[in-house]
Image (spheres, rainbow, N blue to C red):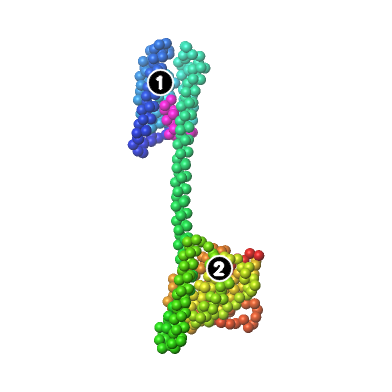
Amino acid sequence: MDAPAAPRHRRSRRDRFVDTAMFMLAVAFGFYTSVERLHTSPLPPAWLFSLDQAVGMLGCAGLWLRRRWPVGLAVTLVVLSAVFEMIAGPMLAALFSVAVHRRPRTSGMVFALSVVAAVVFTWLRPDPDMPPLALLTLGLALQGAAAGWGLFVHHRRRLVLAQRDRAARMETEARLRAEQAQHQVREAIAREIHDVLGHRLSLLSVHAGALEFNPGADPADVARAARVIRESAHQALQDLREVIGVLRAPTTEHAPTLACLEELVAESGRAGMRVELRDDLGVREAAVPGRAGRAAYRVVQEALTNARKHAPGAAVRVRVSGAPGEGLTAEVVNDAPAAAPEAAGGGHGLAGLAERVTLVGGRLEHGPAHPDDSGPSDGDPDDSGPGNGGPGGWRVRAWLPWPP
């Protein structure tokens, strides 16, 4: 028997209406049975008729407790129904309540007890005007209808709750997906602005610093530096417009690729850096996948920006190589700085770079360079140019997938 379960909240207007309707139906069923017996003849023994009516009235009153103790009330009424006829109405209502509010297993056990009670009642108080089998069949039909209706309501309520839970989960998942999409958009904005504008602004810083620390420079040099600053600022604005355009309508139409690598190196050279580019791809450069090519360009761009900031005056060597099926490799190695570097940043550039490379299925390595870090060597003994990675140097290397 289930433990008493107190209601968790006050009954609603609908609950009161249902409880009143159940009570009235049970009273009507008992009243109809009493009138019917008065017109015919009460079931034997005749002296039990008055007690039967009193027990039926108490059973109807007990229905007001069906929400609080559904199983206990149902078992009590089922046991009484084995002897008393007028309790049938409240007993059917109690069977319905158990089927609605309790698990099907509990409902089945109470219903089985009601079947036994019906058999006992048919044996103890047979109806003179109805065959025992017909009386038993009628009683089982009414009990089965009440229990079946209750199970239908029970499963329907569970289905409605499951649909509500599913809708709530879908709403939560949709909100989480929207938040994740916003987070990805914010990361894309930060990554693009850092990669694109960081390079341009570092060039501006270099030329502006040259003008600041050399105020007596030749007017022609000053004019040339001012022109480079103006052009870099204009290009930074153009790059910013392209980034905003990409974020408004995602496209890779204006994204730089390996074909723009020579211009990137030349631009760094005009800023005073000593950069050597070795492109081992040759005609295969056009076959490089677009995502891998763009990622390789960003690797070189970020590495040059870091070298300009943290290793001013150092020689830098850039090398790109690879083949279909082997992968694309982009490597940048710089010597120890010839002058005092700027204050170290927060490392967000390399973190964003590693994320970008990982997104295309590649690997990024970076760390202090060693004397033998002259980039990927092809066995040429004279392969020792700028950026051979002496003590104090830095090396950035990215491997990107290149399907065969």
Q: Looking at the figure, which quarter contains the C terminus?
A: bottom right
Q: Quadrant of residue 208?
A: bottom left
Label number found at residue 294: 2
Q: Secondary structure at mark 2?
A: helix
State the separation of the CA atoms marked 1 and 2.
83 Å
Q: Residue at x 38, y 21 (%)?
A: 28
Pointer 1 residue: 29
Q: Quadrant of residue 401?
A: bottom right
Q: Residue at x 48, y 64 (%)?
A: 245
Residue 161 lies, with reference to residue 274, above or below; the image says above
Could one spot residue 391 in this view of the protein? no
Q: Looking at the figure, which quarter contains the N terminus?
A: top left
Q: Give the amino acid type for the residue marked by disc 2 in the picture.
A: Arg
**Front residue (pair 387, 88):** 387
Q: Give the amino acid type for the residue marked by disc 1 in the picture.
A: Phe
Q: On the picture, is 4 further left or further right than 127? A: left
> How many numbered markers are drawn?
2
Q: Position of residue 123 (x, y in %)?
A: 48, 17
**Front residue (pair 219, 123):** 219
- Badge 1, how many Cα within 10 Å: few under 14, some, many 20+? some
Q: Position of residue 21 (x, y in %)?
A: 38, 27
* Stretch of the chain drawn in magenta: 92-106
Q: Are marks 1 and 2 in contact (CB under 8 Å)?
A: no
